[in-house]
Image: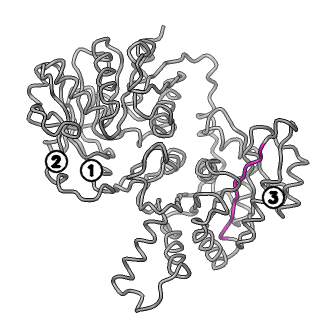
Amino acid sequence: MKYIFMTGGVVSSLGKGITGASIGKLLQLHGYKVNMIKMDPYINVDPGTMNPFQHGEVYVTADGAEADLDLGTYERFLDIVTTRANTNTAGHIYQTVINKERKGEYNGGTVQVIPHITNEIKRRFTAFDKQVDITIIEIGGTIGDIEGLPFIEATRQFMLEQKKEDVMSIHLTFVPYIEGAKELKTKPTQHSVNKLREVGIVPDMIICRTQYPITDSMKGKISLFCNVPEEAVVEARTLKSIYHIPESLHKQGVDEIVLKRLNLKSKIKFNHKWLKYVNQDTTNYKTVRIGVIGKYADLKDAYKSIDESLKISAMDAKVIADVEYISSEDKNLIKKLKTFDGILVPGGFGMRGIDGKIAAIKFARENKVPFLGICLGMQCCVIEAARNLLKFKNANTTEIDKKTIYPVIEMLDEQKDVKYLGGTMRLGNYESDLVKGSLAHKLYKTDKIVERHRHRYEMNPKYIDMFKEVGLDVSGYHKGVLPEIVEMKDHPFYIAVQFHPEFGARPTKPHPLFQGLILAAKARVK
């Protein structure tokens, strides 16, 4: 078993997850089985209760863990399905250790950060032993953060305990450009590596995030002061697409350096197919404009997987997706909607922005604009149809109006007495049966699907027949009872789902629903 540890320095949000996943993809193209693990130093047990403005989207694993958005990057690059074993936080680790202490599992000993917390962290490093060839472990945060010290100490111990050829350290750092001096500065990288070495970890490779090319003399300087071979100082320049990063690293020989450091040889002839697919020439492609109507329009990371799913489907359909995020509270919403070839209303929680989402859905329905609704987006479809087609003026979800006389969306009985918000919704994979002949059935080309969920409220089944009379059909059910998909008759493309299809998209494998939306939007472009 081989392990690669990814750390970051100077500033946060450099892209450790994307860089690690890119290296993992290259190792896959050499024939190796790869998985990734995220270690987040924050005290929250998971990001499920965190505001998207602070943390971006909450990713959901197949087995129902709420996780960091980096897990979506792992899945899309490596074509894997993540589970709870892929995501760890300081909060969950401390909770585990404290629970063991309460049960008396430490035999009355004093429970400390070292060895108890660090041992629990190290145990999680080995989650995929005997399942894959290489595990890439991303240590969240920035070197020097006080909350990250137990993770760095656990990494140091773990690397010491393994054979040298079985572990590797890669440090991602930032090389800033000083406008006044018109030059890049390596000093922050030197300080960052020194900080890493102070805690006992000597990096085997330094990857430099930069907006501008790094010269050979700069690489030589970083090599000299950071004690890393010059060929292991790698440029990671900002590129047009994140899917171009693996090829950029491959051209710099990163995969060969990693294989050599881990005493490995390529198992197969390097497979260029994936790289060629994601680097296709888009010069003559048409552009389709997709409007995403939500309440986090100013924060693209809140819809990270949706954004990637749209672009993946566009890549497959040989068009360019121009995705614009519009606030559902925008006063000029309807005017802006007229400029799009397709409209998507994503998930969310709470009442803010609901009226705007409903207005966008009404516009898409009446003007025959290709439309996809996701989670709360589906619930808003149901409310819109109830109010404007069934003429139930005060129809609503009980999440917003507990006393509505038309509760077309309501909470399941088992959810009504939930005390804790985190991890208590319908989470993870659930099966749905599709109605034959429906749009959903045509898109998926199967009778049964499995998709990931993250919600607490459901469409009220008692209104199904009423909606059918006005053209809104239920075309997917969970256990034959709970509506999972609705679609509109006499519309070029109108479908909404209770689950999150964005978690299922992969380069070379677009999700059927997103692919359907993009193709329907493409058909409108002259």
| Mark number displayed over residue 267 | none
Q: Residues within 10 Å of mark 2 (few under 14, many from 20)?
A: few
Residue at numbered disc 2: 412
Element type where label 1 sits in the image: strand
Please state which of the two labelled residues, at mark 1 or mark 3, is closer to the viewer.
3
* Residue 391 position (above or below residue 241): above
| Mark number displayed over residue 190 | 3
Going by the numbered disc 2, the residue's amino acid type is Leu
- Disc 1 to disc 2: CB gap under 8 Å: yes
Going by the numbered disc 3, the residue's amino acid type is Gln
Q: Is residue 482 magenta?
A: no
CA gap between label 1 and label 3 equals: 47 Å
Q: Quadrant of residue 365?
A: top left
Q: Residues within 10 Å of mark 1 (few under 14, many from 20)?
A: some
Q: Is residue 175 magenta?
A: yes
User: Which sits in the foreground, 162 or 291?
Assistant: 291
The disc, 1 or 3, on the residue closer to the chain's N-terminal end is 3
CA gap between label 3 and label 2 equals: 56 Å
Find the magenta span and give its range. Answer: 166-176
| Mark number displayed over residue 426 | 1
Q: Quadrant of residue 498?
A: top left
Query: Residue 392: x percent and y percent?
Result: 12, 23
Direction right: furthest residue: 217
Identify the residue at image location x=51%, y=82%. Answer: 112
Quarter of the image with the N terminus is bottom right
Identify the residue at image location x=13%, y=42%. Answer: 481
